[in-house]
Amino acid sequence: MKKTFVLAILFILPIVAYLFFASGVNNFGKLPTLTENVNDVSNINGNVSLHDKITILGFLGSDIENKKANTFNLNQKIYKRFYEFNDFQFVMLVPKGNEEKVAELTDELANLADTSKWKFVYAEESQIKDLFLSLKTDLALDENLATPYVFVIDKDKNLRGRDEDEDEGTKYGFNTVSVADLNNKMVDDVKVILAEYRLALKKNDPNRRK
């Protein structure tokens, strides 16, 4: 009898522990909010908004030719993996006057994936700077109004990131130059925020899949 009891405990405990930790990830895993109420791009372009969307926000700048590698990294590692999720978009701020360069870039991206979730917003210098400053990060735009970093914005226009990153402390954005940063950190964080919203949707509508 004692042997049976011991064997049962040894068999059941690992299962209980697994269910406990799995439940913890699903119920309590949440990407920290670093900045609330980021400026909405709808103030610049009324056809695009951060509200009610999970957004990857970037600042492409005017030197688009030299930012193609960054964009392709982001497209291959993040966009192609997640773009089919509902309410998910990529928004890139670009200085006015670069429409033709962006058209060329979009054509190249279209050879790699459906580009319907890529949104390019053309803005004045002051508008780009104001939006970037509203993120309240420790990063800066370069002389072309660009940064290699992209940012995760939730449906309430809050900047999400890591407040206890092992390398950076507070991690506001993800470096598109670094495939390792995209693969090892950004993929995980996008999964977390999508899971957070999917869980909320399932609670409200059990029949909704994404």
Image (cartoon, helix red, strand yellow):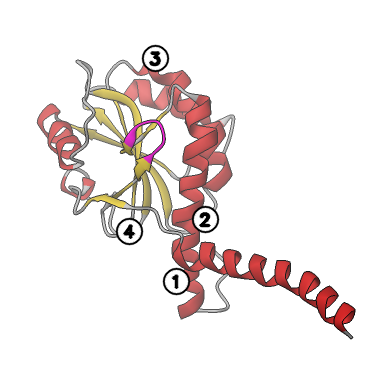
Residue bearing mark 2: 85
| Mark-to-mark CA distance, 2 and 3 | 29 Å
Q: Quadrant of residue 135?
A: top left
- The magenta span reads 165-169
Q: Residues within 10 Å of mark 1 (few under 14, many from 20)?
A: few
Nearest to the eye among marks 1 and 4: give it: 1
- Choose the circle earlier in sequence order: 1 or 3: 3
- How packed mark 2 is, by other alpha carbons closer than 10 Å (few <14, some 14-19, many 20 or more), is some
Furthest residue toward left: 126
Question: Residue 183's spot in the image, x, y percent?
Answer: 54, 34
Q: Which mark is residue 155?
A: 4
Say which amino acid is labelled 3: Glu
Give x and y (percent) for residue 116.
47, 44
Instruction: Examine the rendered structure and indicate whether residue 169 appears above or below residue 153.
Output: above
Q: Return the residue at label 3.
A: 65
The disc, 2 or 3, on the residue closer to the chain's N-terminal end is: 3
Q: Amino acid at mark 4?
A: Lys
Residue 168 is one of the magenta-drawn residues: yes
Residue at 89% x, 86% y is: 1
Which residue has dot 1 on it?
200
